[in-house]
Amino acid sequence: MKLERPSCELCLRPTRTCLCDLVQKVNSNIEVIIWQHPSEAGHPKGTAQLLYLCLPNSRLYVGEHYTASALGVRSSECALLYPEEEIQSGLKGCVERKSTPTHQLLVLDGTWRKSRKLLYLNTWLADLPRVNLPSEQSEYRIRKAEQPNQLSTFEAVQLGLKVLDPHARVGCLTTVFSAFVERYEKFIPTR
């Protein structure tokens, strides 16, 4: 019989590793829709739940298949935060970035392999305009990336909000993310 560990109702982590003390609320005019692959939900090094708690104007969904309407995506106002070259190499029929204002930001949360799977399973994503981010070095030292400039979901959304909503005070998210990484580095055995 497996015993359940007590968990925090907000951050969904075991009470011993609760992240709620790290949360700093950031208001933005951009609604962030976080679409998490099921294999990422509950992952101890995942950042989506912490991001969701820091952004009052956000929603978090877990699953592999959704329609745009099920996610509340307003296609004329939404942009997908995903590298354009990834979409073009995997899906046909991509559209160029529209000139209409962006009021929603859709981000796929999962490993690169799992986020690509979400793209392939939900071909309507290819029709969304994309937000391409400037290349930045990731500080996400607790998980491996395929490329050095691949960011965690938390870092990518922070940078995306800087681009789309320059008036949002997202700088404090750097402190939140650094504290998160430092906390988990304590659990990594040294060699």
Image (cartoon, rainbow, N blue to C red):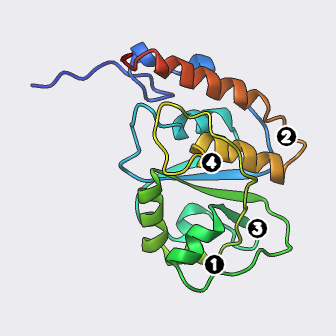
Q: Is residue 16 left or right of residue 102?
A: left
Q: Residue furthest right?
A: 167
Residue pointed to by mark 2: 168
Please tell me which residue lies in front, 19 or 31: 19
Quick check: 107 above or below 154? below
**What amino acid type is highlighted by mark number 2?**
Ala
- Res 149 label: 4
Please tell me which residue lies in front, 187 or 46: 187
Front disc: 1 or 3? 1
Residue pointed to by mark 1: 127
Q: Residue at x 46, y 37 (%)?
A: 143
In whole angstroms, how far apart are the C-alphas of marks 2 and 3? 18 Å
Front disc: 1 or 4? 4
Pick whichever of labels 1 and 4 is earlier in the sequence: 1
Q: Secondary structure at mark 4?
A: loop
Q: Residue at x 48, y 51 (%)?
A: 146
The reply to whether the C-beta atoms of the residues labelled 4 and 2 are less than 8 Å apart is no
Q: Residues within 10 Å of mark 1 (few under 14, many from 20)?
A: some
Q: Residues within 10 Å of mark 4 (few under 14, many from 20)?
A: few
**What amino acid type is highlighted by mark number 4?**
Asn
Residue 103 in the image, given as x and y percentages of width and height: 78, 59
